[in-house]
Image: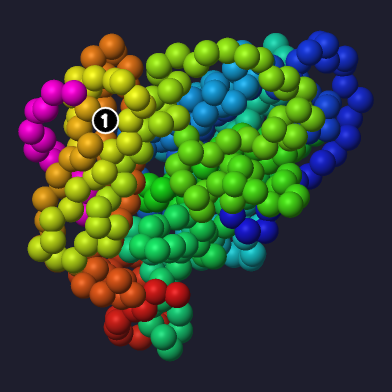
């Protein structure tokens, strides 16, 4: 999330309807936003087997957030490219240069490949690329990167046992192309492949924020365009009201429906936050008041390309305060996804991540090195103990 920039280029444009929300500079209407979401894979990498589940999850999250924040004053729809976009370039070529270089190289290739152009019906178009790689070598599931003589070090935001996105090796970027009337956004692997708490904030921040010209608020705050990704999931964040007002949004008093209330309220946090091998783990659930739950489904994953394992749940009436995940027999990262349905039909889906550690300060090590950690790809030595920053 570092090194953000925006190319604010000017262009005389047709008048915008009075009352319409606009880009930050007021030049393009954002009453209707269409986001083309593309999963980008270098020529020498293999697409994740569950890539579509992951992409659909983030699309759903950012759509619900945008609807809650703008109501019917700005409508955003995502459109997922049906197949992974396989690059003509290999990882090493894409990574040449700095983080800006890989951004323009990646977005330029996808833009040209899809013949991405401004919408002729007045919708503001955004090209959002979710990349399979990071700017620099990084095992984003274990959150480890090569570091010369040190071997491997952790790269990511870890606060009181909770994992948030934000690896220095990541390289997420976005820009608003005013002359073309479109936005470009790139979320690197660290920002979305591993569902840390706050990853959905990264996807909106880059894909729907900077792409319409929004800067980081000054002073900083807990909004999605500021520190939101380090504080919680996107439903726990918001857009800065002053920024929304500049875009033409105005407050309207409405009573949110139960679907919106469920989206805003539901969380599922691991307890303990940093379990040890053999220690029982549960998800502590937070619900809106006075709801009855019809079903809860939980799945777990201990490898980025591994199968999702069903976690058996005991049916209970009312509103469960927790769900048991069981225990883990080894040190490992764990991704989880929970799907809930209320008796009245409303649904929520939430993904999260934690690490099983014997020492809270000691990151787990992979039994099999990912391609980014293999010695032939990096000038590093033998894998050794890794301390958290």
The vertical placement of 375 against 20, above or below, is below
Look at the image and tell me in which quarter the C terminus lies. bottom left
> Can residue 120 be seen in the rendering of this structure?
no
**Left or right: residue 77 compared with residue 355:** right
Q: How many marks?
A: 1
> Can residue 169 be seen in the rendering of this structure?
yes
Residue occupying the point 78% across, 13% down: 19
Q: Which residues are magenta?
A: 300-318
Question: What secondary structure is the magenta-colored segment mainly?
Answer: loop
The front one of 240 and 125 is 240
Could you say where residue 209 lies in the image, as x and y percent from the top left? 65, 37
Residue occupying the point 40% across, 63% down: 160
Residue occupying the point 18% across, 23% down: 318
Q: Is residue 108 magenta?
A: no
The vertical placement of 258 against 389, above or below, is above
Residue occupying the point 59% across, 26% down: 69
Could you say where residue 280 lies in the image, as x and y percent from the top left? 13, 56
Residue at the right extreme, as displayed = 12
**Left or right: residue 14 compared with residue 173:** right
The front one of 294 and 197 is 294
Look at the image and tell me in which quarter the N terminus lies. bottom right
The vertical placement of 309 against 72, above or below, is below
Could you say where residue 48 lies in the image, as x and y percent from the top left? 32, 45
Report which residue position mark 1 lands on: 339
Which SS class for mark 1?
A: strand
**Left or right: residue 126 compared with residue 130:** right
Q: Is residue 314 magenta?
A: yes
Quarter where residue 319 is shown: top left
């Amino acid at each position: 999330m570092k090194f953000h920039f925006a190319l604010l280029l000017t262009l005389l444009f047709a008048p915008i309807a009075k009352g319409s929300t606009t880009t930050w500079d007021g030049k393009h209407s954002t009453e209707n936003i269409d986001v083309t979401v593309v999963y980008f894979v270098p020529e020498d990498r293999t697409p994740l087997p569950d890539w579509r589940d992951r992409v659909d999850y983030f699309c759903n999250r950012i759509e619900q957030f945008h609807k809650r924040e703008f109501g019917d004053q700005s409508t955003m729809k995502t459109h997922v490219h049906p197949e992974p976009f396989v690059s003509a370039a290999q990882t090493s070529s894409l990574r040449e240069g700095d983080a800006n270089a890989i951004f323009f190289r990646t977005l330029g290739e996808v833009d040209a490949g899809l013949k991405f152009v401004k919408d002729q019906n007045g919708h503001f178009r955004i090209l959002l690329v979710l990349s399979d790689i990071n700017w620099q070598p990084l095992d984003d599931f274990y959150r480890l990167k090569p570091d010369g003589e040190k071997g491997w070090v952790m790269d990511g935001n870890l606060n009181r046992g909770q994992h948030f996105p934000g690896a220095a090796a990541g390289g997420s970027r976005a820009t608003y192309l005013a002359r073309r009337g479109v936005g470009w956004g790139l979320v690197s692997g660290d920002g979305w492949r591993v569902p840390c708490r706050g990853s959905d904030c990264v996807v909106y921040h880059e894909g729907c924020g900077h792409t319409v010209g929004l800067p980081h608020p000054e002073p900083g705050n807990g909004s999605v365009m500021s520190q939101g990704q380090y504080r919680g999931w996107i439903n726990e964040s918001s857009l800065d009201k002053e920024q929304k007002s500049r875009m033409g949004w105005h407050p309207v008093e409405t009573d949110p429906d139960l679907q919106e209330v469920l989206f805003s309220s539901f969380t599922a946090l691991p307890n303990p936050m940093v379990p040890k091998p053999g220690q029982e783990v549960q998800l502590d659930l937070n619900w809106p008041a006075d709801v009855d739950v019809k079903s809860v489904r939980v799945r777990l994953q201990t490898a980025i390309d591994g199968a999702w394992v069903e976690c058996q749940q005991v049916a209970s009436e009312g509103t469960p305060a927790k769900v048991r995940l069981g225990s883990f027999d080894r040190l490992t990262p764990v991704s989880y996804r929970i799907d809930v349905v209320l008796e009245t039909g409303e649904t929520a889906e939430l993904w999260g991540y934690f690490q099983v550690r014997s020492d809270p300060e000691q990151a787990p090590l992979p039994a099999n090195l990912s391609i980014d950690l293999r010695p032939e790809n990096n000038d590093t030595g033998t894998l050794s103990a890794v301390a958290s920053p």
